[in-house]
Image (spheres, rainbow, N blue to C red):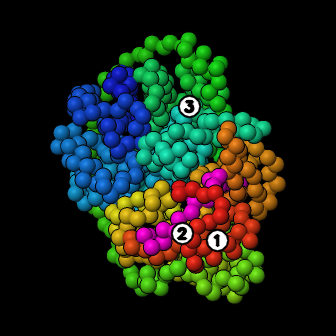
Amino acid sequence: MPLLLSPAGTFPALKAAIDAGADEVYLGGSMFNARMNADNFDKEGLKKASRLCKNSNVNMHITLNTLIYDREFKSVLEYVDFLANDIDPDALIIQDFGLLKVVRENYPDIPVHASTQMRIHSPEDAKYLKSLGVSRAVLARELPIEDISEFVKTGLETEIFVHGAICVSESGGCLMSSVIGNRSGNRGECAQPCRLPYRTKNRFPLSLKDMCLANHIPEITKSGVTSLKIEGRMKSPEYVGTVTSVYRRLIDENRIATGKELELLANIFSRSGFTDGYFVSKITPDMFGVRSETDKQKSNKTTFNIPKAEKRKEKEAKPDSLPFVLPERDESKVLHPAKQKGVVLRFEGRLPSEALLAKYAENVARIDIPLDNCTDKRFLPYKEKISAVLPRTVFLKEREKVAKQLRTAKEFGIKHATVSSLNQIDLCEGFWLHGDYAFNIVNRETIAFLERYPFSSLMISPETDGRFPKGSKCALEYIGYGRTPLMYTRTCIIKNIAECKHKEKCFAVLTDRTGATFPIISAPNHTNIIYNSLAGYRLDRKSELKKSGIGLMTLLFTDESEKRIDEIITLAQNGGKPNFEYTRR
């Protein structure tokens, strides 16, 4: 029987979760957690919460699931020290690879769970997480049951979301709130731009309904998932208690929800109903919905007397921590930074013409092309400079296709591959590897962690100004020009706002309330990438970035004309101010 994990953004919500039958709760302190706008718990509040959980035989997980800047490591380690000595949590939930490294090195006895913000999409991730001493993986909400079941077979504890809000962007992959509103979702400050109206035929093209897997409990139980998670640290105690109580009964009786239970769940909170689209692999426009006035009125009128759950069995002892083992860097599998300097041309939309390639290819460090397009005959003369950019996420059923494309690329003569997760490393045996921006590198500890793997280069997160690294065994890369990729969506947003012609590359534009336009470009398997309305420009800071160890400047092109591309490359070579509107983010 799986455990039931409930949210607690306040002490009343914590008590409601426990009374309603939660086996586990997750909550955050006053800093370093992905719900900074919740009330959360100060140090005395955490002590009080810990006592209640221990007296109730309930596991308490502390969220440390945000990216950490260098200047914050002293504070975060002082906080972890307090947690270790005064709270004794059953687990820490961590997103940042650098923080994971430091915590495992200094606090080996505290169980660590890998946050969904770590972008855990593949059973192949389990191998890496086990080697890092992670005891549980919180899987991405986008995974279907087939992928979840395969992950369970790896033997790592597995936690999945079964109820609550879901993001249209892949887990851990949204920069939209950060870039356009200076409130980072990776820092717990998301302003939820996906819930806003846009100037499209569907006024809310990014707003997904809440997830509800109440009709899938028997198959989830059969899969062997360790813990079922309810989202909602920003929700009321009434919500937490009601939803926990319903799922408690469903788990105990191993059944699907009745019509009355589904109605109760919808009435307590929904956005035009619920969706199970990701879980059952039905990625359709029916997944989208908003919080209507009718939904709000139903919630205001809904009351539910939460039955107090029966006394639980004694808590099991904490699992022994797995050893923390980082690989030794194999210099024979990487390029030295001295061999990787200058400009990287990256094309994520229209491909470059043969004339443009002939003019610039010989004088650039690398040319990044999507894996789907990298064996186009126009690239043959420059094959040794081409890097095949893998899709941001590779799901289980897509893995063999990607492996086949990589074999074809190798036969074509391509020697580089750009990857977005550790699980993609094994797919790229025999290529020089480059770590993409999706690794969310914002501190030196994460660089020290990733450079143990066979990466020749690592891209610094566009959420930073790029000036913190101070060097690495890898070449360090930064986006000097380009529209920042804001979202990578599993759903096809283009279908929501325009005609999707199912072509190799579909383009659309999303216009917000202010008139700003955000290009959307299709990615493999009808996923989409949404880009910022303005291009970021940092080429006039090359000297500052070079002092920090940035040796590669990426020029990211999406929908630019060849004339504009020519202009940008000239600026990259010679410096100077652009003659167009731009942003620093």
Instruction: Report the residue marked by disc 2.
Output: 539
Label 3 is placed on what type of residue?
Ala
Can residue 249 be seen in this snapshot?
no
Residue at image point 76% right, 57% down: 506
Q: Position of residue 434 (x, y in %)?
A: 51, 73
Q: Residues within 10 Å of mark 2 (few under 14, many from 20)?
A: many
Q: Residues within 10 Å of mark 1 (few under 14, many from 20)?
A: many
Q: Looking at the picture, which amino acid does disc 1 mark?
A: Ile
- Residue behind mark 1: 568
Q: CA distance from mark 3 to mark 2?
A: 51 Å
Instruction: In this rendered view, identify the residue nearer to me: 529 or 108.
Output: 529
User: SS at mark 2?
Assistant: helix
Magenta part of the chain: 524-545
- Labels 2 and 1 touching (C-beta < 8 A): yes
- Nearer the N terminus, badge 2 or badge 1? 2
Q: Secondary structure at mark 3?
A: loop
- Magenta stretch containing residue 409, yes or no? no
What's the residue at 56%, 31% (across, down)? Answer: 214
- Residue 381, given in percent of the width and then of the height, sits at 69, 88
Please say if the residues under marks 3 and 2 sit with CB atoms less than 8 Å apart: no
In the image, is 397 to the left or to the right of 38? right
Identify residue type, mark 2: Leu
Quadrant, the N terminus: top left
Which residue is labeled 3 in the image? 214
Measured as percent of width and height from the top left, residue 121 is found at 53, 55
Q: CA distance from mark 1 to mark 3?
A: 52 Å
Residue for point 58% across, 67% down: 577
Above/below status of 495 relative to 27: below
